Amino acid sequence: QVQLVESGGGLVQAGGSLRLSCVASGRTFSRYAMGWFRQAPGQEREFVAAITWSHLNTYSADSVKGRFTISRDNANNTVYLQMNSLKPEDTAVYYCAADGNTSRLRTVKASYWGQGTQVTVSQ
């Protein structure tokens, strides 16, 4: 089992920045691919970004490319999502996810999920 706890959400004005953190506990963190998803009210959960356990590969949704950066610190069992140039359409609950399979992680069928953190971007 892997437990994931997100933090760092909040209210920010359009054009601003936030950094989300997700701390993992349980099984060996460094062997899991990690990712971020988001879900806006009335919409399905969608993929945002992912990073492989080796740091060698990162993936991002087209809607956040050039603005969001995913990174991880295996020594501290933490994955980050740096969000810059935020837009009102980025408003959502952001979820951290983990899976031993990177391809599966990039779908909503990832094995482990956090509880989510709210990000609200005002005009």
Image: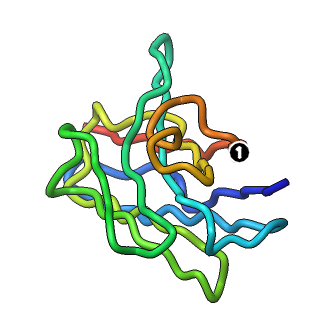
> Residue 122 at x, y = what percent?
32, 39
**Residue at the bottom extreme, as displayed:** 75
> Residue 95 at x, y = what percent?
57, 43
Q: For numbered disc 1, what is the local secondary structure? A: strand
What type is the residue that disc 1 sits on?
A: Tyr
Q: Which residue is mark 1?
A: 112
Give the position of the C terminus as an image quadrant. top left
In the displayed structure image, the side of residue 45 where residue 84 appears, left or right: left
Disc 1 crowd rating (10 Å Cα; few below 14, some 14-19, many 20+) is some
Residue 83, above or below 106: below
Residue 109, above or below 50: above
**Residue at the top extreme, as displayed:** 42
Which residue is found at the position 46% from the left and 24% from the top? Answer: 40
Give the position of the N terminus as an image quadrant. bottom right
State the colouring used for the structure image: rainbow
> Residue 89 at x, y = what percent?
28, 31
Residue 49, above or below 79: above
Which residue is found at the position 42% from the left and 61% from the top? Answer: 51
Q: In this orientation, which residue lies closer to the viewer: 68 or 61?
A: 61
Residue 82, above or below 63: below
Which residue is found at the position 69% from the left and 41% from the top? Answer: 111
Q: In this orientation, which residue lies closer to the viewer: 98 or 90?
A: 98
